[in-house]
């Protein structure tokens, strides 16, 4: 096979591969753009705004991201992560001793049972005390439920935005690889057309001394 033919074959293959990489990069970029726009649209629809710097409590000021995003509208995945973990998470820790919605179900059920027994016994003072405790626990559980729900939704948005960020990074790598492959393919074509048509690929050279032996014979 001629060297020029081999160069052209490899160069054409490189051009095809560069084209495929370019298509893959465009797809990844499109997916990243969709993820970012979708997250921004969904978060903007919630109309959540971070507290301004002058209204932050001492505990809130200890969270760097709350200071960084102070007064801003929540529209990005990183902001959603901050609001979920450093704002909602912080306040959930101070509600009902940091117990979760599921954990608060146990004392709530116990108080309901005790209240029912007190009502049957006709103990009005105990009924009033237990009713107050039940109301407090129920209110705390509802608050925790709302906080955990919003926190989960925000973290889901953050996770979705991370897929978009990863797609952006992958697109950059793919575009770089496509550009490199294109340059190599073009270099191969240039080399093919400057190489004489008669030059073979990996030509076999005669062994030393063969010519002398043939002449002597």
Image (tube, rainbow, N blue to C red):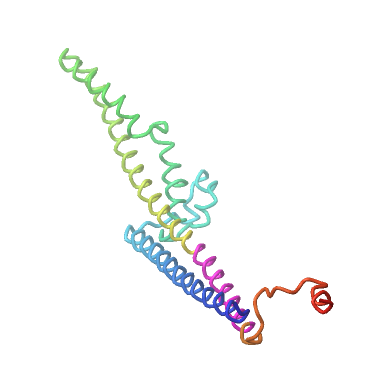
Residue, x 46% and y 71% (percent of image)? 20
Residue 214 within the segment the image draws in magenta: no
Which residue corresponds to the image point at 65% horizontal and 76% vertical from the top-left? 201
8 up-or-down from 60: above or below: below
Residue situated furthest top in the rendering: 121
* Image: 86 above or below 73: above
Q: Position of residue 111 (x, y in %)?
A: 26, 22
The residue depicted at 42 percent of the width and 57 percent of the height is 161
Q: Is residue 106 left or right of residue 88?
A: left
In the depicted structure, whether residue 7 falls above or below residue 85 = below
**Viewer-closest of 26 and 57:** 26
Please, what is the dominant secondary structure of the magenta stretch? helix
Figure disc tally? 0
Q: Is residue 203 above or below residue 69?
A: below
- State left or right for residue 118 relative to residue 18: left
Dividing the picture into quadrants, the one containing residue 176 is: bottom right
Specify the quadrant that holds the N terminus. Answer: bottom right
Q: Which region is colored magenta?
A: 169-191
Q: Tell me which residue sits at (53%, 67%) in the image.
A: 172
Percent position (x, y) of residue 36?
41, 63
Considering depth in this image, is 85 or 125 the residue closer to the camera? 85
Q: Nearer the viewer, residue 134 or 127?
A: 134
Q: Is residue 126 left or right of residue 207?
A: left
Q: Is residue 184 magenta?
A: yes
């Amino acid at each position: 096979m001629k060297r020029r033919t081999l160069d052209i074959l490899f160069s054409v293959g490189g051009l095809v591969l560069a084209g495929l990489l370019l298509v893959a990069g465009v797809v990844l970029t499109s997916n990243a753009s969709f993820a970012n726009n979708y997250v921004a649209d969904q978060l903007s629809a919630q109309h959540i705004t971070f507290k301004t710097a002058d209204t932050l409590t001492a505990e809130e000021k200890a969270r760097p991201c709350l200071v960084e995003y102070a007064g801003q509208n929540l529209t990005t995945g990183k902001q959603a992560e901050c609001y979920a973990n450093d704002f909602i998470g912080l306040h959930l820790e101070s509600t009902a001793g940091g117990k979760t919605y599921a954990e608060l179900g146990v004392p709530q059920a116990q108080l309901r049972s005790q209240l029912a027994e007190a009502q049957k016994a006709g103990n009005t003072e105990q009924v009033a005390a237990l009713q107050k405790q039940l109301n407090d626990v129920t209110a705390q559980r509802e608050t925790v439920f709302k906080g955990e729900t919003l926190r989960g939704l925000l973290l889901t948005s953050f996770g979705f935005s991370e897929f978009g960020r990863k797609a952006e990074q992958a697109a950059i790598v793919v575009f770089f690889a496509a550009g490199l492959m294109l340059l190599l393919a073009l270099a191969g074509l240039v080399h093919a057309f400057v190489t004489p048509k008669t030059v073979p690929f990996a030509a076999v050279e005669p062994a030393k001394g063969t010519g002398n032996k043939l002449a002597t014979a």
